[in-house]
């Protein structure tokens, strides 16, 4: 499996998860490369959620539709506890509880490092909806 994450991507992801857990004074634990991104704990250390963070190099206002790979969604679904997807935008985060989101699934992809698009990946795309919440960076 090819990984596209750069150091910039990792910093964007970290900023997003830190902003997300700051809502409830929580903590997070990074999971492995072949898993979803994080376990999330409340202020008392109780596991409350699993979170997948997706980078979105756009502002919140023009970030839609929001993409996420279906493979990641299936891994998140398997966790069976408050599954959340967070999109890390330039000016803040968009997040939603997976079971409340409505989207469409189609074959699409993203450009690889050489610029060619891998369109053989099954992706979910989410348009703006009431289930999304927003937090701007300070």
Image: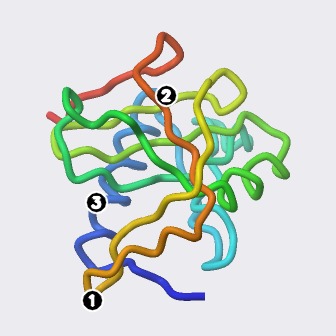
Which of the marked residues, 1 or 2, is nearer the chain's N terminus?
2
Q: Is residue 7 above or below residue 121?
A: below
Nearer to us: label 3 or label 2: 3
User: What colouring method underlies this structural image?
Assistant: rainbow
Q: Are marks 1 and 3 in contact (CB under 8 Å)?
A: no
Nearest the camera: 77 or 122? 122
- Disc 1 is placed on an element classified as loop
Q: Position of residue 104 (x, y in %)?
A: 59, 35
Which of the marked residues, 3 or 2, is nearer the chain's N terminus?
3
- Disc 2 is placed on an element classified as loop
User: Alpha-carbon neighbours of circle 1 within 10 Å: few (<14), some, or many (≥20)?
Assistant: few
User: Alpha-carbon neighbours of circle 3 within 10 Å: few (<14), some, or many (≥20)?
Assistant: many
Check disc 1 and report the residue beneath it: 114
As measured in the structure, the alpha-carbon distance from the residue carrying label 1 to the one carrying label 3 is 22 Å
- Disc 3 is placed on an element classified as helix
The answer to which quarter of the image holds residue 29 is bottom right
The disc at residue 12 is 3
User: Alpha-carbon neighbours of circle 2 within 10 Å: few (<14), some, or many (≥20)?
Assistant: few
Nearest the camera: 115 or 15? 115
Q: Are marks 3 and 2 in contact (CB under 8 Å)?
A: no
Residue at image point 61% right, 24% down: 102
Q: Position of residue 80 (x, y in %)?
A: 85, 42
The disc at residue 24 is 2
């Amino acid at each position: 499996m090819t990984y596209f994450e750069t150091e910039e991507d990792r910093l964007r992801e970290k900023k997003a998860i830190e902003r997300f857990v700051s809502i409830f004074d929580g903590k997070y634990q990074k999971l492995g490369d072949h898993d979803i991104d994080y376990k999330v704990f409340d202020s008392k250390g109780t596991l409350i959620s699993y979170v997948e963070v997706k980078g979105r190099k756009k502002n919140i206002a023009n970030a839609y539709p929001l993409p996420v790979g279906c493979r990641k969604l299936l891994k998140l679904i398997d966790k069976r506890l408050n599954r959340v997807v967070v999109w890390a935008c330039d000016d803040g985060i968009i997040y939603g509880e997976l079971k409340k989101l409505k989207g469409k699934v189609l074959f699409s992809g993203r450009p690889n490092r050489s610029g060619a698009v891998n369109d053989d990946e099954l992706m979910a795309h989410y348009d703006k909806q009431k289930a999304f919440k927003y937090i701007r960076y300070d």
